[in-house]
Amino acid sequence: MDKRIQKIREIFAIEYGDAVCTLDYEKPYELMIATQLAAQCTDARVNIVMKDMVKKYKSIEDYANADPIGLMEDIHSTGFYRNKAKNIIAAAKMLIADFGGRVPDTMEDLLKLPGVGRKTANLILGDVYGKPSVVVDTHAGRLSRRIGLTKHTDPYKVELDLLAIVPPDYQTLFCHQLVYHGRKYCKAQRPDCVHCPIEMYCENHI
Ligand code: SF4
């Protein structure tokens, strides 16, 4: 294992040993929908919206048959609601028509779903199916560049760089821990490098 990742892993185990996905969900398709809503929106806002949504839409069929205008109103506060509503309904219909109502467990099939990109697909593969996967969201990308784990800004290239150095059994947890670390120390505007527990392993590319 990359020695720096090993050291960071030891420190993160103490700091964020129980890090989990910051989106709330119970059913796999709820994670798919929540992740779509999280585009250009905070996870906290999505969690508030989803809390009401799960009371109204109790199955994947409810999403597939949703009134588009009503769904747009329900998700309005997450932004880009027209496109998101269109994709959620289309993805729900495809899940029923092509996958027996079950969220698929391969990257290839997940990417067929409208509105599902690599970030959502990797999150589902890792969190729902326990498969090694690297989720590159804004936080993971920013921190990976600052720490010096990648030089890329393209999320897919960042994903490939992380896949090469983070062991499979740590990939999902590592990405969740990056989100926690970004919130606590490595904030977008003012990173707290002085108090950061991994400062000695960071290249500080700010
Ligand atoms: S040392 Fe600074 S830039 Fe590096 S991870 Fe810590 S807070 Fe972020």
Image (cartoon, grey):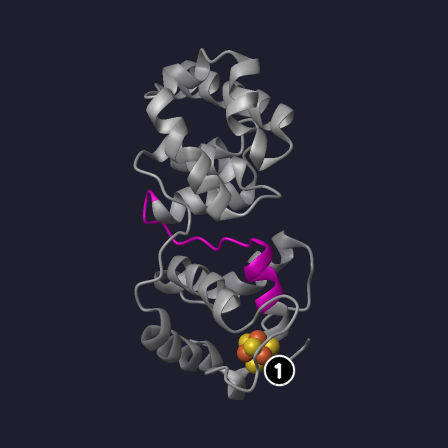
Image quadrant holding the C terminus, namely bottom right
Query: Please, what secondary structure does the residue beneath circle 1 have?
Result: loop
Instruction: Count the numbered circles shown.
Output: 1
Q: Is residue 16 magenta?
A: no
Above or below, comparing residue 205 to residue 108 in the picture? below
Vertical side of 174 occupied by 101: above or below = above
Quadrant assignment for the N terminus: bottom left
Q: Is residue 41 left or right of residue 43?
A: right
Q: Is mark 1 within 8 Å of ligand 1?
A: yes
**Which percent across, then down, holds residue 33?**
46, 32
Q: Circle 1 sits on which residue?
A: 203
**Does residue 117 appear left or right of residue 205 in this picture?**
left
Magenta-drawn segment: 128-143
Above or below residue 79? Residue 43 is below
* Amino acid type, mark 1: Glu
Image position, residue 176 (x, y; %):
43, 59
**In the figure, residue 54 lies in which quadrant?**
top left
